[in-house]
Amino acid sequence: MAHNLNIENIEEPIAQASPEVKAIIERVLRIEKERLHQKSRKYINDDILKIVKDVVK
């Protein structure tokens, strides 16, 4: 089974996203990075929902 993955285009969907979607992605990635060292990622869903609501306003 051969997969031809073109990793050069892996960021293309993000690059072509609207400014609002890019803002959501950047903020979600930031909070995920901040919590990588934690065993419990409690409340991350609430934080992600807050980010989406803040950006969509």
Image (cartoon, helix red, strand yellow):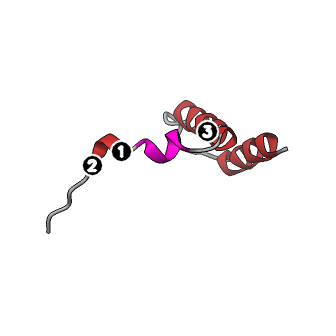
Q: Residue at x 80, y 40 (%)?
A: 54
Q: Main secondary structure of the magenta part?
A: helix
The residue under label 1 is 9
The residue under label 2 is 6
Is label 2 in a helix, a strand or a loop?
loop
Q: Residue at x 25, y 53 (%)?
A: 5
Among numbered discs 3 and 1, the one appearing first in the sequence: 1
Is label 1 in a helix, a strand or a loop?
helix
Q: Residue 55, image x and y in percent?
A: 77, 40
Closer to the camera in the image, 29 or 24: 24
Q: Which residues are magenta?
A: 11-16
Q: Do residues under tags 1 and 2 come within 8 Å of each other at their CB atoms?
A: yes
Q: CA distance from mark 3 to mark 2?
A: 22 Å
Q: CA distance from mark 3 to mark 1?
A: 16 Å
Say what amino acid the circle numbered 2 marks.
Asn
Using a 10 Å C-alpha cutoff, classify the residue at mark 2 as few (fewer than 14 neighbours), some (14 to 19) or many (20 or more). Answer: few
